[in-house]
Amino acid sequence: MKKLLHIIFMIPFLVMSQQQPFPQDSTDVEYYIIEGDSIPKSIIDLDEVIVLHKLKFESKDERIKYLILKRKTIKVYPYAKLAAERLTTLSERLETLDSKRKRRKYAKRIQKYIEDEFSAELKKLTRTEGQILIKLIHRQTGRTTFELIKELRSGWRAFWFQNTAKLFDISLKEKFQPINIKEDFLIEDILERAFQNGRLDRQKPAFDIDFYDLTDKWIHNKTSNNASTD
């Protein structure tokens, strides 16, 4: 059984690469040529694995707040992920259209599809869930909800949505800033944990987020209200 497992484990490497020795001075170094890549590599690139700190809360209330934020973040993240996927599809399709009229027509069709399919669910979101969603849309697309509405519809419609959102204390211009805002860091922490345990499907953010820089600021230089490592 152990021998069989060893063979199964090696199959992907046998299929994806071929091993070739390249003499270097007096030391033999083994290089790998990955299929589709003409550059020999001395190592095989692997996705970075982020080592998460162990959460510790200063009080029961702090723990409850984190759990509430976790529930809301996990609930709305799929909508932000969908927005990024639809935006990519929209952008790729628009590049193939040769007139402004066709581009406007297609953009409205995509927007209508999203509204028809998800508007009922989105209307059920609470104010805080809506604000988290707006932040995550920025995380996944690199643009604020205000900017996206302005691009897909018109500047006036974006302005109208912005002022309507203000009635519910929600800003469509909100950005995701985990290095500057403690709650955004906690959202990023929640996402990373959910990605690693398979609860959410990972989708890369539109901009670089260094989780270790975040933990250096919010965990290692913690205040009494921050979660910390053991």
Image (cartoon, rainbow, N blue to C red):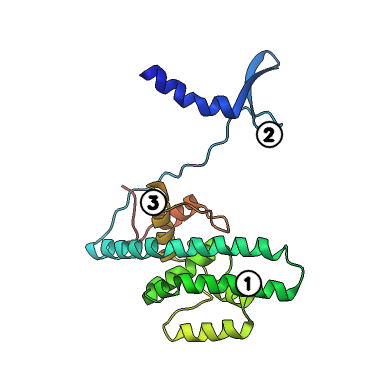
Label 2: how many Cα within 10 Å (few below 14, some 14–19, many 20+) = few
Numbered label attached to residue 107: 1
Q: Position of residue 3 (x, y in %)?
A: 40, 17
SS for callout 2 = loop
Residue 176 seen from this side: no
Measure the C-alpha gap from mark 2 to mark 1: 37 Å
Which residue shows up at 41% across the image and 65% down it? Answer: 76
Q: Residue at x 28, y 57 (%)?
A: 57
Residue 22 in which image quadrant: top right
- What type is the residue that disc 2 sits on? Asp
Q: Which mark is residue 143?
A: none
Q: Is residue 160 above or below residue 32?
A: below
Q: Earlier in the sequence, mark 2 or mark 3?
A: 2
State the residue lying farthest toward the left: 60
Say which amino acid is labelled 3. Arg
- Pick whichever, 230 or 121, lies toward us: 121
Residue 170 location in percent, x, y? 45, 79
Question: Which circle marks residue 37 in the picture?
Answer: 2
In depth, the one of 140 and 115 nearer the eye is 115
Can you see residue 87?
A: yes
Q: Nearer the viewer, mark 2 or mark 1?
A: 1
| Nearer-the-camera pick, 139 or 15 | 15
Q: Residue furthest right?
A: 98
Front: mark 2 or 3? 2
Tell me: 8 left or right of 60.
right
Residue 13 image position (x, y, % from top left): 54, 27
Position above or below: 158 against 55 = below
Work out whether 83 lies above or below 9: below
Q: How many marks?
A: 3
Which of the two discs, 3 and 1, sits closer to the camera?
1
Asked whether the beta carbons under mark 2 and mark 3 sit within 8 Å of each other, the answer is no
Identify the disc placed on residue 193: 3
